[in-house]
Structures are given as structure tokens and as C-alpha cells.
């Protein structure tokens, strides 16, 4: 068996982990490497869509493999063959599929560049959320995860989008592994076009093998619903991949059950994440919210809402629906309405379609109202949504009149809505998401605090510039990470008890070598083959 970590080696995110065995080749995830992306690009300097795969390939975001990328991303104006062949690790390959762990774009985004007939294996929720995310994002050529928008060339050999009236979008085949029941509503959503362009799709099908190799999928706890770990049986034994996981959410027990179940397979290789490892000797986590779990976050946020005399704004990471449901419960207990943005309502609808017994339909959930932000034009999906929610739609001016009746779920990027709301005295902004990692994020926090000061809104849990954008000690506990602490991770690995450990999605792979002396630990290097 050969294993090549094309991304996620010594870095967090961008996972592309190629496994080759017995004539089968598949990749665990195929995400966007944000660390490479942000080394070269920023909001106003992006990969040029007109050049197809050239730009992401040149900066090292796409593996030098011929035979796996979409034909319509190869413009005739670029000699991609020469570009490929100039790469020292160039090779040809037929890829049998992607095992997608969850819908975070650092795991899924660059599926966009793959041939549209390469199947994706995942959970029903990952399929639903991935499509909702693609439907609601503005035609970004790096994010065509569920369906491709065919491209064509202009006379200069530049790639452009095809005529949306004439050329339909093409769905990728998605296979659901151990899905439980897949409702009609999810199948219906899967084939529904959101953008005015016709969508030709394959129905979601249940399948638990890739090219004859059996696959098992295990639901694990993480900061997005539907996260999975996988095990694939090869001639050499079972290969297990954790994806991203934690113990501190409401479904933490599932992560433990996964470890116990998979240990019975006596796996030969475990590919594990290690996001919250802070150094080689970090056996004891130094993360700020060590003891916090989702129930603590609920209690702390509930108290903050109870104490608020005016409006409450809740800011949690995009697509963190578990946190959204936490605030829904808080809204119910405090007699407020939960105002969500249209993107969140759209995703929530699809999550309801996938797990109707766990998540209510936002359209019929009395506590939820739709916040219409100020914009002059709207996409097709949003018009359809607003039509449906007409009877329960509010805007900044509605909130302005009765601020104590609302929790508005918005992020920094919607903060200019405060101008219409004009918050009352005693209003609060609860920040329930991660601290700043990059310089740009730090600047955003400065801007956020300027807005809050301008309107006299009290920040709660917002990273503080006076302590290097960490959350002050007395304001901790409004957020919990999507990843597990070092000690917990070591104990999960020992429960699984593989022969070989391959750490990915971590900045400190050396930690595993040092702490797991009883195991063979292979520290991967980007693009270099490991042989077992
Ligand atoms: Zn990740
Ligand atoms: Zn993730």
C-alpha cells in the first residue's frame, strides 16, 4: 500500500491523502489548503479562473497528477502538459473516488477541480450541507463541490462560464456510506437547481465499497454536522482516517464509539488529525477552553442573554449549526425570536431534510424568523427563500422597534446592519467562534470593536487587542473548539490501537513520534510517497 499526503502534512487543513492499493486509488478528502492559498492570494488577488487549473497548480495547491482534473479547466492557451511534466513528482493516475469526511472547505473545496465522474463518498448530511454551501456561494470556481458549472473558451483561449440558459450544470455522483434512511426531501433537494441554470444530477445512492474494497463510515463529533471517519479494507489490512473530530460537543460519545468500533478491525494504519497540538511536548493541552464543552457554552450564553437589557447579537462560525441550535434553545428559554440570515435558513432547511427528527423545519419553527439584510440584488435561491418566508421576515428596522425580542445571528461581515438597528443601551455582541489566527483576522477584530464602540454595544467573548487578540480570562467559555485536546487524542489513538500512525492536519507531527513511542509513527512529507 502506498500513501501520499499531498496536503495536510505539517499543516492544518487542505487534506488530500492519496491511498493506492491493489489497483485502486482514492483520496481521503480533497480540500483547499488555506495556508498555501493565503501565502499567495488575498481577497483582491485571487487565482485567475480564466486560466483554469494553472494558478492553483503553480502555487502548489493541486497535486501534479494527470488524468484526475476536469477537461474544461485546461485552457488551450496554456501548455498544461509541459507544466505537469516539468514537475519532479509528475504522474498519471486514475482516481476511483474521494472519501469526504465533512463539508468544511479545507476538506472538500478542491473537489471542484476533479473530473465530474469521480464519485464522492460521504454522509447524507455532508452531501446536504455541501450542496447548500455551493448553492449559496457566488459562483466561485474553486468551490464546485457537488456540481460543475461547465466552462468554455473565448477566442483568446481564456476560460469563461458557459451560457446558463443553454448548458446545464452537471452533478457529481455522490455515494452515501451507511446512511441510515435517506428521505425523499433530501433526494428532491439534491436534484433541485438553485441558480436558474438547469442541473443534471445523479440521485444519491447508497454504496459501501470502492472498486471492490469495503468502506465503513462512522459519524464523529466536530463543529459541523455530518462529520465522518472512514475505514477501508485493503489486502494489507484496514486503513482508518479520522477526519476532524472532538469529544466536547453534544455528540462527543460518537467519537468514542468510533474509536471502540474501529479498534475491533485491528487497523494497520491510522491517519489522524492533530489540530490542537501546540508543541512536541504538549501532552497536556494549553488551549484556552480546555474544560469547556457545548453544555457549558449553552449555560454561559444563556446567562449572557438573560442579563442583556437590549438586543443580543450572536456571532458563531459559518455553518456551525450545532451552535445555531444552542442559540435557538436559548431564544426559546428567554422568550426571544432567533433571527437568522438567509444562508443559514437555507442550510438549516437542508439539514432538516437530512435529519428531520433531530432538526425542525425552520419554516415552521415559531422561534425562528428570517433577517433580510440590505442589498439591491438577489440570487435565485434567495428570492425563492424570501418568497416562502414572507410571513416571518424582518429587517433592521423591525428589530430597532423591539430589540429585547430578538437574538440576531450575524457575523462581522453583516455588522453594518447596526446602522438600521441602532442598538438600545444594554445591547450585547456574543462572539462564539475561534480566535484570530492571521493578521487579516486581527484587523477584522479591530474593525468589529470599532463598530461595537460606535453603537455602544458590549462585546462578550471577543478576542482582545490588548492581549494579542486572545479572549480575556474573564470572558472565556462562550466557544468550544471543533477539535480535541492532546490527552484525549492520545487516548483515542490508544483505543484504536493501530500498527502505524500517520499524523496529518497538524503543525506538530513530531508530537506523535515523541508521545506514541509504542507505535510506528510515520511523519508524512508533502507529496512524498509512504510505503507500507
Ligand atoms: Zn479541518
Ligand atoms: Zn473541519
Image (cartoon, helix red, strand yellow):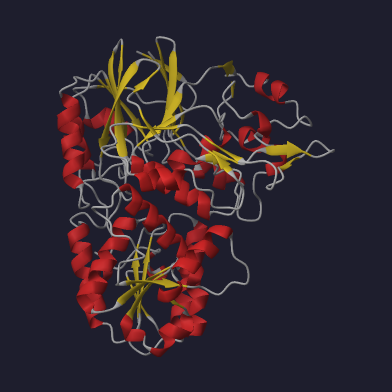
Q: Is residue 285 above or below residue 336?
A: above
Between 498 and 49, the one lying in front of the other is 49
The picture quadrant where one finds residue 423 is: bottom left
Q: Is residue 470 above or below residue 449?
A: above
Q: Residue furthest right?
A: 155
353 with respect to 267 (left or right):
right
- Which x, y percent locates residue 479? 29, 61
The picture quadrant where one finds residue 10 is: top left
Q: Split into 4 quadrants, where in the image is the N terminus?
A: top left
- Which x, y percent locates residue 32? 50, 40
Between 434 and 344, the one lying in front of the other is 344
Q: Split into 4 quadrants, where in the image is the C terminus?
A: top left
- Which x, y percent locates residue 401? 41, 90
261 with respect to 58 (left or right):
left
Kindly identify the residue that appears in the image at 24 percent across and 53 percent down: 358
Q: Is residue 28 visible?
A: no
Kindly identify the residue that appears in the image at 56 percent across and 24 percent down: 68
The picture quadrant where one finds residue 91 is: top right
Q: Is residue 143 above or below residue 272?
A: below
Total marks shown come to 0
Q: Is residue 105 above or below residue 369?
A: above
- Which x, y percent locates residue 225? 32, 48
Q: Is residue 101 visible?
A: yes
178 with respect to 399 (left or right):
left
Amino acid at each position: 500500500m502506498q500513501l501520499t499526503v499531498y496536503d495536510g502534512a505539517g499543516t492544518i487543513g487542505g487534506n488530500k491523502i492519496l491511498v493506492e492499493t491493489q489497483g485502486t486509488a482514492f483520496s481521503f478528502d480533497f480540500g483547499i489548503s488555506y495556508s498555501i492559498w493565503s501565502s499567495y492570494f488575498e481577497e483582491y488577488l485571487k487565482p485567475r479562473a480564466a486560466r483554469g487549473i494553472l494558478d492553483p497548480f503553480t502555487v502548489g495547491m493541486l497535486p501534479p497528477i494527470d488524468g484526475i482534473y476536469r477537461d474544461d479547466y485546461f485552457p488551450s492557451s496554456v501548455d498544461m502538459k509541459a507544466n505537469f511534466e516539468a514537475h519532479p513528482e509528475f504522474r498519471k493516475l486514475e482516481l476511483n473516488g474521494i472519501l469526504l469526511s465533512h463539508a468544511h472547505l479545507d476538506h472538500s473545496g478542491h473537489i471542484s477541480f476533479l473530473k465530474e465522474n469521480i464519485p464522492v463518498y460521504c454522509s447524507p448530511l455532508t452531501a446536504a450541507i455541501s450542496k447548500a454551501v455551493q448553492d449559496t456561494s457566488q459562483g466561485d470556481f474553486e468551490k464546485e463541490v457537488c456540481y460543475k458549472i461547465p466552462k468554455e473558451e473565448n477566442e483568446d483561449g481564456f476560460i469563461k462560464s458557459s451560457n446558463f440558459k443553454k448548458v446545464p450544470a452537471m452533478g457529481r455522483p455522490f455515494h452515501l456510506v451507511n446512511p441510515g434512511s435517506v428521505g425523499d426531501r433530501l433526494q428532491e433537494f439534491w436534484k433541485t437547481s438553485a441558480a436558474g441554470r438547469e442541473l443534471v444530477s445523479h440521485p444519491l445512492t447508497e454504496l459501501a465499497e470502492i472498486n471492490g474494497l469495503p468502506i465503513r463510515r462512522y459519524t464523529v463529533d466536530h463543529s459541523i454536522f455530518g462529520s465522518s471517519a472512514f475505514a477501508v479494507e485493503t489486502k494489507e489490512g484496514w486503513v482508518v482516517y479520522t477526519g476532524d473530530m472532538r469529544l466536547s460537543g453534544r455528540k462527543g460519545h460518537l467519537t468514542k464509539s468510533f474509536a471502540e468500533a474501529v479498534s475491533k478491525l485491528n487497523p494497520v494504519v491510522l491517519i489522524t488529525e492533530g489540530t490542537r497540538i501546540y508543541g512536541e511536548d504538549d501532552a497536556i493541552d494549553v488551549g484556552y477552553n480546555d474544560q469547556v464543552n457545548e453544555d457549558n457554552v449553552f449555560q454561559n450564553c444563556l446567562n449572557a442573554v438573560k442579563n442583556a437589557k437590549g438586543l443580543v447579537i450572536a456571532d458563531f462560525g459559518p455553518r456551525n449549526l450545532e451552535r445555531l441550535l444552542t442559540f435557538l434553545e436559548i431564544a426559546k428559554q428567554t422568550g426571544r425570536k432567533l433571527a437568522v440570515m438567509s444562508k443559514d435558513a437555507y442550510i438549516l432547511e437542508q439539514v432538516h431534510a437530512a435529519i428531520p427528527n433531530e432538526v425542525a423545519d425552520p419554516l415552521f419553527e415559531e422561534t425562528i424568523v428570517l433577517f433580510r439584510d440590505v442589498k439591491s440584488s438577489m440570487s435565485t435561491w434567495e428570492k425563492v427563500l424570501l418568497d416562502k418566508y414572507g410571513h416571518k421576515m424582518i429587517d433592521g428596522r423591525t428589530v430597532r422597534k423591539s430589540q429585547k425580542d430578538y437574538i440576531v445571528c450575524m457575523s462581522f461581515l453583516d455588522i453594518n446592519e447596526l446602522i438600521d438597528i441602532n442598538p438600545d443601551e444594554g445591547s450585547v455582541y456574543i462572539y462564539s467562534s475561534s480566535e484570530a489566527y492571521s493578521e487579516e483576522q486581527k484587523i477584522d477584530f479591530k474593525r468589529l470593536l470599532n463598530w461595537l464602540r460606535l453603537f455602544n454595544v458590549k462585546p462578550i467573548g471577543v478576542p482582545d487587542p490588548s492581549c494579542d487578540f486572545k479572549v480575556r480570562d474573564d470572558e472565556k467559555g462562550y466557544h468550544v473548539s471543533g477539535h480535541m485536546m492532546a490527552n484525549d487524542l492520545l487516548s483515542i489513538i490508544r483505543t484504536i490501537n493501530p500498527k502505524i500512525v500517520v499524523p496529518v492536519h497538524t503543525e506538530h507531527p513530531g508530537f506523535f513520534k515523541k508521545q506514541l513511542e509504542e507505535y510506528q509513527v510515520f511523519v508524512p512529507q508533502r507529496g512524498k510517497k509512504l510505503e507500507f
